[in-house]
Amino acid sequence: MAGYVRKFPSIVAVVLSIVLPLILPQAKAEDSETRRAQAMQFGLFFGGIATQYDECTRRGFVPSGDRPAEDKAAAYLKASEQFGRDKEGSEYVQKGWNLAKQKIQEQSQEYWEKNCQSVAQQWNKYVDMFKLQ
């Protein structure tokens, strides 16, 4: 195949000039959709754990920190938005977090009893990873 390409570079150039314009708009749309999905997923996980941690604190399953986890998470996201200037990404992170909040409200007492230690472990990983204060 490599020899074929070397012999016919003009054919390859012609084919690429026809095919690439057809493919690139789709690739850009998928890339944009992927970024939105990743931002929303981050909001679900990061914001969701912060909300769960605060709920675990309210229920007495984990100790409270110097300030609520949701406040720390919101401050981190605000700083990230200002630094990155990705308004659309920030909106999707918030959409993910809002979805997590809705689902968290539906959880039973048994859920909290079983999961608060895991939630605390994950939140502490985020605190260390993102240097949250």
Image: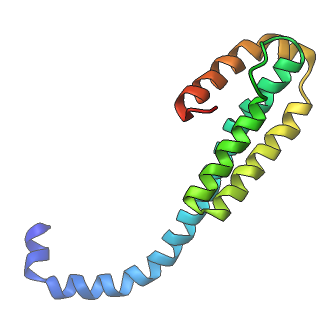
Residue 125 sits above or below residue 93 on the image = above
Residue 40, image x and y in percent? 68, 50
Residue 116, image x and y in percent? 77, 15
- Looking at this view, is 33 or 3 the one in front? 33
- Looking at this view, is 116 or 33 the one in front? 116
Q: Is residue 84 left or right of residue 119?
A: left
Residue 125 sits above or below residue 35 on the image = above
Q: Quadrant of residue 89?
A: bottom right
Q: Quadrant of the N terminus?
A: bottom left
Residue located at (70% from left, 43% from top) = 75
Q: Quadrant of residue 58?
A: top right
Residue located at (56% from left, 32% from top) = 131
Q: Can residue 24 be seen by looking at this rendering?
A: yes
Residue located at (20% from left, 86% from top) = 11
Specify how the rendered protein is coloured. rainbow
Number of marks in picture = 0
Q: Quadrant of residue 99?
A: top right
Residue 112 sits above or below residue 3 on the image = above
Q: Is residue 30 left or right of residue 22?
A: right
Q: Quadrant of the C terminus?
A: top right
Residue located at (53% from left, 31% from top) = 129
Residue 35 sits above or below residue 107 on the image = below
Residue 125, image x and y in percent? 58, 24
Q: Can residue 41 be seen by looking at this rendering?
A: no
Residue 81, image x and y in percent? 63, 56
